[in-house]
Image (tube, rainbow, N blue to C red):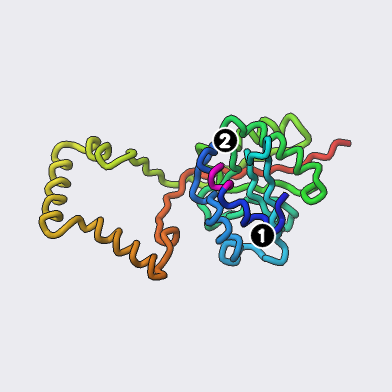
Amino acid sequence: VITTEAGWHRMADEWNMLLVKSACHLPFLRHEYLVNWWETRGGGEWNPGTSQLAVITATRDGELVGIAPFFSGINRENEAVLMFIGSFEVSDYLDVIAHPDDLREFIQGLLFFVSTDPLTRGKKLDLYNFSDCSLTPDMLEGIALQSVWRFNRELLQPCPVIKLPNDWEAYLSGLDKKQRHEIRRKMRRADEAGGNPHQRRAQARLDGQRQGGPRAAEDAVHFRRLGVGVFLAIAVRR
């Protein structure tokens, strides 16, 4: 368990390298994003006096293979819990970080560790903002129900989804002939007028960032998709 900011900062490179290969590659899981969130606890969403880093990692032969980006704190029901760093109003989606082939093994080890380690034992997992394409909630449910954990899943709210093609040409090919013609005509007129206005705006934004302007993350607009909350609590066997 990583409980110090210094220890957490040292793993920035291997953190992001694993994220690229993970089952759920999300910008809200990048190391630099979560570090910035932690510095203000989501803009004051959580009390620094009652929250502590509790990042749980797994390695195999010295290689990082799994990350649970947790912190311990007191939730809105006044319960001692482990939650995702980034929870929950600011970050659209959150998750654990592991390669798809390692995800089940990592979750199994994670639940065992949380239920036995002195730092985490007795705390609930109060996990918000899974993407609807995340593999984690179903795996958590299956593994938890075969162990000492109780499991509860709640649907948060439906959110609009806009699915876009992978590139500009694919987008154009999906339009009807009249729309494609009109877009290309306007693009030609923009080029004739002195370059593509989209390129000029992008360059202006880049120049603004170099001069200390707003960060790209602050300029981004994100569409929230269907969210799923997962709650886990240790069931005491008598």
Q: In the rendered view, does 213 fall on the left or right side of 2?
A: left
Q: In the rendered view, does 113 fall on the left or right side of 55?
A: right
Nearer-the-camera pick, 37 or 91: 37
Residue at 76%, 38% in the rendered image: 112
Q: Are marks 2 and 1 in contact (CB under 8 Å)?
A: no
Question: Under tag 1, what secondary structure?
Answer: helix
Q: CA distance from mark 2 to mark 1?
A: 25 Å
Residue 106 point in image, percent of width and height: 66, 36
Looking at the rendered image, the disc whose residue lies closer to the viewer, 2 or 1, is 1
For marks 2 and 1 on the same chain, the one whose residue lies earlier in the sequence: 1
> Label 2 neighbourhood size at 10 Å, few (<14), some (14-19), many (20+)?
some
Let me know if residue 78 is in the magenta part.
no
Q: Which residues are magenta?
A: 14-18
Can you tell which mark lies on residue 99? 2
Question: Under tag 2, what secondary structure?
Answer: loop
Residue at 40%, 61% in the rendered image: 219
> Label 1 neighbourhood size at 10 Å, few (<14), some (14-19), many (20+)?
few
Q: Amino acid at mark 1?
A: Ala
Residue at 17%, 41% in the rendered image: 180
Let me know if residue 15 is in the magenta part.
yes
Residue 38 point in image, percent of width and height: 60, 60
Looking at this view, name the residue that lies furthest to the right. Answer: 238
Nearer-the-camera pick, 236 or 199: 199
Residue 45 point in image, percent of width and height: 60, 63
Q: Which residue matches tag 1? A: 6
Q: In the rendered view, does 13 fall on the left or right side of 145?
A: left
